[in-house]
Each structure stands twice: as C-alpha cells, then as structure tokens.
Amino acid sequence: MLASRALVRGLQSGFWRRVSTSSGAWAAHTHDVDVLDCSAPQYNNRLDTPLPDVPFVRNLSAEQKKLKEKEKGPWTQLTKEEKLAIYRLTHELSFSEMKKGSKEWMTVLGGMFFFFGFTGLLVWWQRVYVYGDVPHTFSQEWIDKQTQRMIDMRVNPVHGFSNKWDYEKKQWK
C-alpha cells in the first residue's frame, strides 16, 4: 500500500511538473494566432453609434476598388445596386436591420423554464425521498401546549410574549 501511494505521488508530481513548465505552454502555442489589437478602432453594429469608426470591409477586392473610385464622381450616375454595394462596404447592417429584434429572448425563456422545471423535480424528489414526516412539534395541539407553558412560566413579561396575556381574565389582551 505504501508503494502504491508513492507511485501515485510520483505520477502526480511528474504530471504537475509537465503542466506547470513554460515549455509545455510554448508547445501549446506554436501555431500562428490572429491577435486582435483592441486599442485600434473596430467596426461594430450599434443603435447608439450608427456611424462606425472604421468601414465594415477593410480589404477591398478589385471590383470594390473600382466602385470606390466611381463613388468619388457624381452619384446620379450610380445605379441603385451600386449605391447599395457602396453602403454595404461601409456598413454591415442598415439601421432598420439593426432595430429588427432577434429571437434570443425565446432561448433565454426556454432556458429559464428548463431550469425551473429541473429545480421543481429536484424539490419533489427531496420531499419524497430525502425528507421525513413533518415533526410532531408542528401540530396545533403541541403549539397550544407550548404556548400555555410559556404563559405559565411568564416568559419575557416586559416586552415579549407574556406582556400580551391578561393573567386575571385568562385571555389575550
């Protein structure tokens, strides 16, 4: 038994040494990772800031570059599709598309109902299999006897229980 404990300790310390060394961390991060520079302005779709700091499409294709050159000229010569394409270069969604609601509330409500149901089943299971019968001290006759005992002992006569009992008339004040 002592040998097995030593073996387990040896395996645990060896495992911890492998996990905690920096060479293991470097081995896990050998592939190229795209790092997002959070200090640079970023594109976002928000109702409170409808004009983003940067355009939606940053790397333009050849066709998109031609469209940007055409944009510098008179807009009356542009077709409706070209105007829409220019808009989509700058914005991913229109204002009305941003205002359109999502169905996320259904997922949230469904998740809440699922957890409420699971909690209800857990409470039911505990009542049936975990908790015993209600103690006899919760019965009305026990409460009446205990109340009478406290009155007879004159428990807390100044501000408490016995203060509300009239001892001459033998009734509550």
Image (cartoon, rainbow, N blue to C red):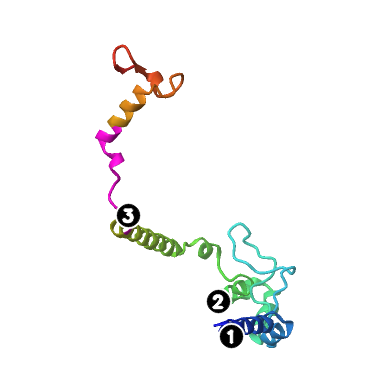
Image quadrant occupied by the N terminus? bottom right
Up/down of 83 relative to 99, above or below? below
**Frontmost residue, 59 versus 127:** 127
- List the residue tagged with mark 3: 131
Type of amino acid under label 2: Glu
Which labelled disc corresponds to residue 81?
Answer: 2
Please state if 14 lies on the left or on the right of 170 as rendered: right
Q: Are marks 3 and 1 in contact (CB under 8 Å)?
A: no
Please report whichever mark, 3 or 1, sits nearer to the chain's N-terminal start. Answer: 1
Type of amino acid under label 3: Tyr
Q: Which residues are magenta?
A: 130-143
Q: Which element is circle 1 on?
A: helix
- Residue 11: x percent and y percent? 61, 85
- Residue 2: x percent and y percent? 58, 82
Q: Let me know if residue 84 is in the magenta part.
A: no
Type of amino acid under label 1: Ala
Which residue corresponds to the image point at 34% horizontal and 15% vertical from the top-left? 166
Discs 3/1, front: 1
3D distance between C-alphas at marks 2 and 3? 70 Å
3D distance between C-alphas at marks 3 and 1? 44 Å
- List the residue tagged with mark 1: 3
Discs 1/2, front: 1
Q: Which element is circle 3 on?
A: loop
Please report whichever mark, 2 or 3, sits nearer to the chain's N-terminal start. Answer: 2
Discs 2/3, front: 3
Which residue corresponds to the image point at 30% horizontal and 53% vertical from the top-left? 132
Q: Which element is circle 2 on?
A: helix
3D distance between C-alphas at marks 1 and 2? 78 Å
**Frontmost residue, 118 versus 95:** 118
